[in-house]
Image (spheres, rainbow, N blue to C red):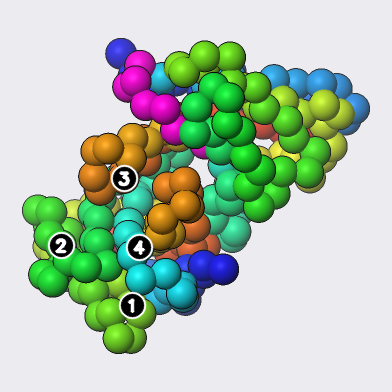
Amino acid sequence: DADVTQTPRNRITKTGKRIMLECSQTKGHDRMYWYRQDPGLGLRLIYYSFDVKDINKGEISDGYSVSRQAQAKFSLSLESAIPNQTALYFCATSDPEAGPYEQYFGPGTRLTVT
Amino acid sequence: AQKITQTQPGMFVQEKEAVTLDCTYDTSDQSYGLFWYKQPSSGEMIFLIYQGSYDEQNATEGRYSLNFQKARKSANLVISASQLGDSAMYFCAMRGGTGGGNKLTFGTGTQLKVEL
């Protein structure tokens, strides 16, 4: 089984709808991240969490919110989806105690907002 | 602020040849890490290689090596003996220093196409 899973893998939604992307991990890592990937822009950080009680904004957090329900679960919500949030979304985990601080990525969620 | 620059949007290489993908970075941190990830057309992110800022030797992992030139702030990826399966998008990324939360800053990527 994959160490980092994301659901759904693909989603098409309409403008104005609320949508939640979920991420689960079995690696036991405290740190979790949400990135979005747009063509030609690489990956950009949306939110990150050091543990259940520590959540931080990344460089592009506007329009998004997150919830860290447990060490293993980190969800990303779009409260009112808009077309420019169409992107590939990645969840990742890391363990600062295990050098070289590699991040382990989930398979990605392809979101289309129409 | 940290920045990663990949100036080659696309590259072509013949099978069995070596190819170098360029990456330059900018940071004021003394301690940092540099990563390369591969993204095939299926979309997943695959970790390839890591170089720490204090590592004296260039990192190598099989056919991948990282040409780290600290004074030039460059961290180029060298793929030797290219294979058709190396065709993918390649991202250079940097982890900042202490207090950075292991966040990665990514470049815009280089699309590599390996030809027969």
Label 2 sits on what residue type? Ala
Q: Nearer the viewer, residue A103 or A21?
A: A103
In the image, residue B75 sits, relative to residue A60, either above or below, namely below
Q: Chain of mark 2?
A: B
Mark 4 vs mark 2: same chain? yes
Count up the numbered dots: 4
Tell me what residue is drawn at x 43 percent, y 64 percent: B110
Q: Which of label 3 and label 2 is nearer to you?
A: 3
Q: Mark 1 highlights which residue?
A: B74
A25 or B12, which is in the foreground?
A25
Q: Secondary structure at mark 2?
A: loop
Q: Which residue is mark 3?
A: A101
Please name which of the two marks, 1 or 3, marks the residue nearer to the observer. 3
> Disc 1 or 2, which lies upstream in sequence?
2
Q: Both on one chain, marks 1 and 2? A: yes
Tell me the residue at 13%/54% (across/down). Answer: B61
The residue under the point 47% across, 68% down is B4
Chain ID at mark 1: B
Please name the residue shown 72% across and 39% down the image: A86
Q: Earlier in the sequence, mark 1 or mark 4?
A: 4
Residue B6: image quadrant is: bottom left
Q: Position of residue A114 (x, y in %)?
A: 83, 32
Q: Which mark is residue B32?
A: 4
First to last magenta residue range: A26-33
Estimate the spatial distance between the alpha carbons at disc 3 and disc 2, rounded to whole Å: 15 Å
Q: Is residue A6 left or right of residue B21?
A: right
For disc 1, the neighbor class at 10 Å (few under 14, some 14 to 19, many from 20) is some
Q: Are marks 1 and 3 in contact (CB under 8 Å)?
A: no
Which residue is label 2 attached to?
Answer: B59
**Residue positioned most to the bottom:** B71
Q: Write down the chain letter for disc 4.
A: B
